[in-house]
Image (cartoon, rainbow, N blue to C red):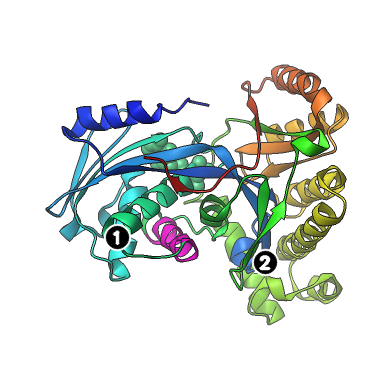
Amino acid sequence: MSSPFARDELTARFMAAFGHAPDGVWAAPGRVNLIGEHTDYNEGFVLPFAIGPTARAAVRRRTDRTARLISSYGDEGLVTVDLERLAPSNMHGWTAYPLGVAWVLGQQGVTVPGFDLFLDSSVPTGAGLSSSAAIECAVALALNELTGAGLTREELVPVGQRAENEVVGAPTGILDQSASLLGTEGHAVFLDCRSRRAESVPLDLAGAQLVLLVVDTRVSHTHATGGYASRRASCELGAEVLGVPALRDLGAADLREAAGLLDDETYRRVRHIVTENDRVLATVKVLVEEGPAAIGALLTASHASMRDDFEISCPELDLAVQTALANGALGARMTGGGFGGSAIALIPAPAEQTIRQQILAAFHSAGFRPPDVFTVTPAAGARRIA
Ligand code: ADP
Ligand code: MG
């Protein structure tokens, strides 16, 4: 993981790029989804938490309608755009995330002035930790404050989501932005994606002598195309054939009838969503009643469902999960949209070094690229830091 600039260094870089100091610096974290994958756009349940790494946006209002943006990542250099001419069709590359947020706010009647923006992020990109939502949420918080728009965090969630859906073209739900904006230290965010009601659920890993290991396979995925969109289409088809507004409305008892009405592939897609929603609810109950050491089997069952029914895993993710479990993990699963990205493993703290080594060795033997292995803890959500 790249290390973020110290806050003062970010301000210094902003000054070097733009010749004046920023009005402020806003940080928004990436997230790990503990459980509840692809359930968000099916109006179901998810249980993510905000993590330590953040995207940080240093921003200064301008008096004209020009936006100038630069990121410490990549070598694109300074991008200058006229906000008057902003449209989803003319936002490209990484700037589609911050500009998308400015555009959505404009669509919602907020007068967004020109701005200078310097972005630095320690959230690895394409690792399934939502570096994209981290950018959207940092920028949404910044522009909300600088324009005096006064939107609540709950209202900023769909601002980031619309930027992702309508500008970037990734048909994602509200999971990522909710975790980044509503997360609190030591807690997961239990989210009902239909009512959009969010509730904090205690997730005290250290207190239970547990560690949550992330294995970034460094197999990259693209949500805007391919598998993610086709899974979403299968879910919509399933709901339509079964006559429900969303797959959220189905329970385990409906699966028998579903098997008779759907083709095998669509049935398995539906079965993943139905069983995954039940696993999220069970995980919340177990966390509250017994604590995190007791959720392992639910995580592992979630992985099997994604691998076999939803078919969004890949050999690297399966190997990470399998190796962790074989070496003492209590549970493990891929996390994020799938087709690459990261797996998580819930492990007893004393087993951390062994499991790390075993995973690296297994990847080496399989001829896979070395994964990036690190731990995460439930951290604070988006906030102003300067
Ligand atoms: P994920 O959200 O899982 O990390 P996405 O494909 O949704 O993956 O988002 C990754 C994209 O976000 C990158 O391709 C890039 O456009 C943008 N991005 C992430 N971090 C940065 C950064 N520090 N600077 C510029 N763009 C970034
Ligand atoms: Mg993303």
Tell me the quadrant of the picture where the C terminus can be found.
Answer: top left
Viewer-nearest residue: 298 or 379: 379
Which span of residues is magenta-colored? Answer: 153-166
Residue 13 numbered tag: none
The type of residue carrying mark 1 is Trp
Residue 197, position as x, y percentages in the image: 61, 68
Which residue lies at the image location 71% right of the left edge and 38% below the top edge? 344
Viewer-nearest residue: 27 or 163: 27
Placement of 47 over or under 210, stated as above or below: below
Q: CA distance from mark 1 to mark 2?
A: 28 Å
Which residue is under mark 1?
103
Is 237 left or right of 381, judged from the image as shown? Answer: right
Prevailing secondary structure class for the magenta stretch in the rendered image: helix
| Circle 1 residues within 10 Å: few <14, some 14–19, many ≥20 | many
Say whether residue 130 is visible: no
| Circle 2 residues within 10 Å: few <14, some 14–19, many ≥20 | many
